[in-house]
Amino acid sequence: MKRQFDDVLLGSIELFCLAAELSSFTAAATAAGVTPAAVSRSVSRLEERLGVRLFVRTTRQIRLTDGGRVYFEQCRQALSQLTEAERQVTGQQARPSGPLRISTPTPYAHYRLLPRLGEFRRQYPDVTIDIHVSNRNIDFADEGYDLAIRGRAPADSSLIARKLEDAELVLVASPAYLKRAGKPKSLADLHKHECIQFDLPSTGKRIPWIFMQDGVATDVPTEGGLSCAEDVLGIVTLARGGAGLVQTYRFIVEQDLASGALVELLPQHGGTSRPFFLLYPHARHLSQRVRAFVDFIMAAR
């Protein structure tokens, strides 16, 4: 097999990744024990080889170009795989270590994932975790995520999707709202009520409310003058404040239901759910830290 990467090129890739991670040639030079000029030469060598500008340079800072960001993420993963390969061969992989970057939507973060991460860190203290709490879709390759939790299986065949749970939905309102507006007795009554809406960040469309009708989960149109985007917990806060009805996950409001702060409505049409999936890219050899997290979160379901 013809050699494509000599020692100088591999060293240049390592220095480029350091500079990208630290956003500084000087900091990368200090971390690597070389001069800033050596880092600059390495980056220039790569840019000449690729025919692509990797950094936008100013007198005060450096910033990855779009092409540089793609190249960095691929190189970072390749270097990580090389490190894992060495650990497997030398038997140094017993303790997972290194950074783990996870994206998760707001409700699953606060009521499922974040309460469990303390235990994960106690089991794997050498793994550092960067959590991105947001309802928007992310790009694994461009943004450098290792795992994501999402409310639907992806169409992207390059991702592995493992179901975490089917989260039950429930219709609720506060006693104050019900005293003022009355309780809906049927699905047909919903048009008489203030139905608080949530707009999906990915599409801008409102999430449909789902109810069981004749044993079938059915989308039911609802209307309301209040809507939230980005933070799905906002609709629950509005409901607690007496603003109207909301359909949400039972795990979010189970304490409110137990205390009486919220009241469950139309239970005869309940029993619907939405899934949550753990997503991560296909890889021939998962890093030990990713594998450890996957095993941990699947066992905690």
Image (tube, rainbow, N blue to C red):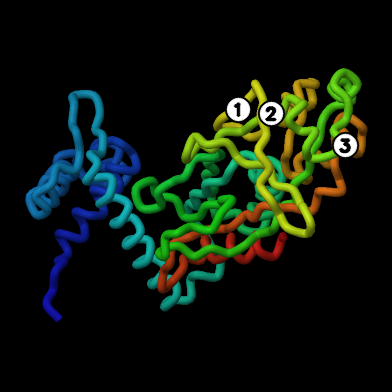
Residue type at mark 3?
Lys
Badge 2 density bin: few <14, some 14–19, many ≥20, Cα 10 Å: many
**Quadrant the N terminus occupies:** bottom left
Can you name the residue that lies furthest to the front here?
A: 188
Name the disc covering residue 185, or none: 3
Label 1 or label 3, whichever lies nearer to me, is: 3
Q: Which numbered circle lies on residue 120?
A: none
Going by the numbered disc 2, the residue's amino acid type is Ile
Q: Is residue 274 left or right of residue 243?
A: left
Q: Position of residue 259 (x, y in %)?
A: 92, 34
Of the 4 image quadrants, the one containing the C terminus is: bottom right
Which residue is labeled 1 in the image?
Answer: 228
The type of residue carrying mark 1 is: Cys
Residue where numbered disc 2 is placed: 196
Q: Which badge, 2 or 3, is on the more N-terminal residue?
A: 3
Residue drawn where x is 70% and y is 48% of the image: 112
Precedes in sequence: disc 1 or disc 3: 3
Q: Secondary structure at mark 3?
A: loop
Q: Tell me whether the residue at label 1 lies in contact with that at label 2, contact meaning CB atoms closer than 8 angstroms.
A: yes
Vertical placement of 246 versus 154: above or below? above
Q: Residue at x 43, y 67 (%)?
A: 282
Q: CA distance from mark 1 to mark 2?
A: 8 Å
- Crowding at mark 3 (Cα within 10 Å: few <14, some 14-19, many 20+): few
Distance of label 1 from label 3 (alpha carbons): 26 Å
- In the picture, residue 2 is in which quadrant? bottom left
